[in-house]
Amino acid sequence: MDLSYTPEEEEFRARLREWLGKALPSLPEKPSPDDWPARRAYDMGWQRMLYDAGYADVHWDASPTVRLIFLEETEKAGAPYVGAGFVGLLHAGPTIAAEGTAEQRARWLPPILRGEEVWCQGFSEPDAGSDLASLRTRAWRDGDEYVVRGSKIWTSHAEVADWCELLVRTDADAPKHRGISWLAMPMSAAGVTVRPLRTLAGSAEFAEVFLDDVRVPVGNRVGDENDGWRVTMVTLSFERGTAFVGEVVACRRVLGELAAEARRNGRWDDAVLRRRLGRLNAEFRALWRLTQWNVSEGEVSGGVPGVGGSVFKLRYSHARQELYDAAADVLGVDALDLDRAWVLDRLSSLSYTIAAGTSQIQQNIVAERILGLPKGRG
């Protein structure tokens, strides 16, 4: 498989680098991590800059390779992360682009691209995390509307979101994977209550969401009724296939910084630590090649990443945890100082083997869908 770039793709890279060099110095100061309205304004302002420069649509209207180049170059340049735009740009937007009607694409995609509307993800529930298909949030049809009742948890960016990509059970009698529908729910609807959750790292980008007879137009359903699990697999393929690309680049940068810090504070004399950092370097180089392979596969499949994303997600989650465990070794006693670089990142890395599908779920997908092994029987 050819993992090289075409002249046109390299020209896109050079043009993007030049623009980033001019645009980044004009950004305002980053707001406090705890001020989510200000963070939303900052993130959406950056998205508007991308839109005005012609780079806003790379997440779904460009080839997977161009998308990869964009994520690589913006991370290398230290550009703002998508932040509050994460769900809209990397999950809901690509799903609507792939599965939505022409009217739905016209309604929801331009505001995401222009940095005008923020989305959150209403998938997990208190009793439906890893086993997502066991969700119990119900939606009953009442004329041209669904009436939704239930709750969601770990709802990313709910406190500043305009819309929610919401999974609901529309047929309680169907097998659990077949009675689900994918809805776009306005967060301003009557009956929606948001309760922020604070993580171990002290951040509050997640929330509980309670839905008390919320009315959602039937026209907001993406895909057919009860076909939401298939649509969800499209969403998750983007989440596991390309959403973490920029983070791989960031981890490679952090690895270089760790080596420099180890040389500065004397930890570099530890041969065991040096071997650990060397192995991590090989690990992240391999993950980058795997990313390129997945992107090449996505080119063939029409832009939607395949199950290879689960291989990437599985290994990346553990590699990230190992990276920040190594950071603790480099820092020594300073690893207990929350004001030191990498300490909060170490705490947040603990969630990566759970977020976007637990490692156990990814192992099942790899075993059954890639290796062709039989499903386990309980």
Image (cartoon, rainbow, N blue to C red):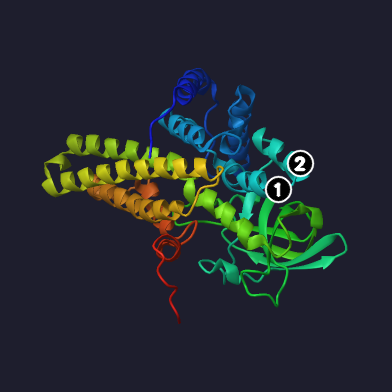
- Where 256 falls versus 49 (above or below)? below
Q: Nearer the viewer, residue 113 or 37?
A: 113
Residue at numbered disc 2: 107
Q: Which residue in the rendered view is the most extreme toward the right? A: 143
In the rendered view, does 251 fall on the left or right side of 107?
A: left
- Residue at disc 2, secondary structure: helix
- Could you tell me if residue 156 is visible in this image? yes
Q: Position of residue 111 (x, y in %)?
A: 71, 37
Give the quadrant of the C terminus.
bottom left
Q: Residue at x 62, y 62 (%)?
A: 229
Location of residue 363 in the rendering, given as x and y in whole percent from the top left corner: 40, 63
The crowding category of the residue bearing disc 1, from other C-alpha atoms within 10 Å (few below 14, some 14 to 19, many at least 20), is some
Three-letter amino acid code at the position of disc 1: Gly
Q: At 45% from the left edge and 60% from the top edge, which residue is drawn?
A: 354
Residue 158 point in image, percent of width and height: 64, 52
- Circles 1 and 2 in contact, beta carbons < 8 Å: no
Q: Secondary structure at mark 1?
A: loop
Q: Could you tell me which quadrant the N terminus lies in?
A: top left
Sort mark 2 into few (<14), some (14-19) or many (20+) by Cα contacts within 10 Å: few
| Residue 196 visible, this orientation | no
Q: Is residue 273 left or right of residue 10?
A: left
Q: Residue 374 location in percent, x, y?
A: 42, 72
Q: Amino acid at mark 2?
A: Arg
Q: Check the image and report above or below for 84 versus 142.
A: above
